[in-house]
Image (cartoon, rainbow, N blue to C red):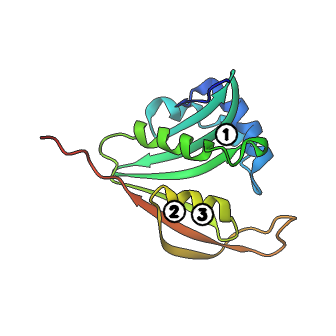
Amino acid sequence: MLQFIARPMRVDDLPAVAVLENAVQLDPWTHAQVLDIAPMLHTGEYIGTVVEQSGQLLAYVLARTMLDECEILSVGVAECMRGRGLGKQVLWQLFEQLPTDIMTVHLEVRVSNEPALKLYQTMGFVEVGRRKGYYAPVPSMPEREDARLMSKSIQPETTL
């Protein structure tokens, strides 16, 4: 049985991330927007992780760091691979590679996205607010949709 491999995102992953983003998001970033983060992956301003199997990208997370906070910008899992723990795996990989000064991770999620909400709650995120009408209408949802604001505290490791 082939294993899933979670690892830090590389610049050469970005074209595949853009394709998966377009396939799984209701309102995806454009291909150009995804590719535009390439120079910032080297600086650490943007970070990301991927899960792959046999060289095929199956899941990703893109995030941005600033001072002591991290904001998750996009998480995607291939439709055919959902329900297999890849979302959790890609997020754990992100947490492991966060700079040590990061204290809090934030994200926004559509109120209707129950699978994502369950995943984030399982991972320790808590709802801290809402943004009314944050998400623009899309063909499958003709009205603006609220966003749940969620945060997770990252506890620094204690040394003995």
- Furthest toward the top, the residue is 54
* Quadrant of res 21: top right
Q: Where is residue 122 in the image (x, y as percent from the top left)?
A: 51, 58
> For the residue carrying disc 2, how many other residues have a C-alpha within 10 Å: few (<14), some (14-19), or many (20+)?
some
Crowding at dot 3, Cα within 10 Å, few <14 / some 14-19 / many 20+, comes out as many
Separation of disc 1 and disc 3 at Cα?
Answer: 24 Å
Q: Is mark 1 on a helix, strand or loop?
A: helix
Q: Where is residue 69 in the image (x, y as percent from the top left)?
A: 39, 53
Q: Name the residue under label 3.
A: 117
Q: Which residue is drawn at 41% across and 38% down?
A: 96
Per the rendering, the mark at residue 49 is none
Give the side of residue 91 with respect to residue 81, left or right.
left
Q: Is mark 2 on a helix, strand or loop?
A: helix
The local crowd at label 1, few if under 14, some if 14 to 19, many if 20 or more residues have their Cα within 10 Å, is some
Q: Is residue 58 left or right of residue 68?
A: right
In the rendered view of the protein, which quadrant contains the N terminus? top right
The percent coordinates of residue 5 (x first, y second) are 58, 28
Q: Which mark is residue 34?
A: 1
The residue under the point 26% across, 48% down is 156
- The amino acid marked with disc number 3 is Leu
Marks 2 and 3, Cα distance to the nearest angstrom?
Answer: 6 Å
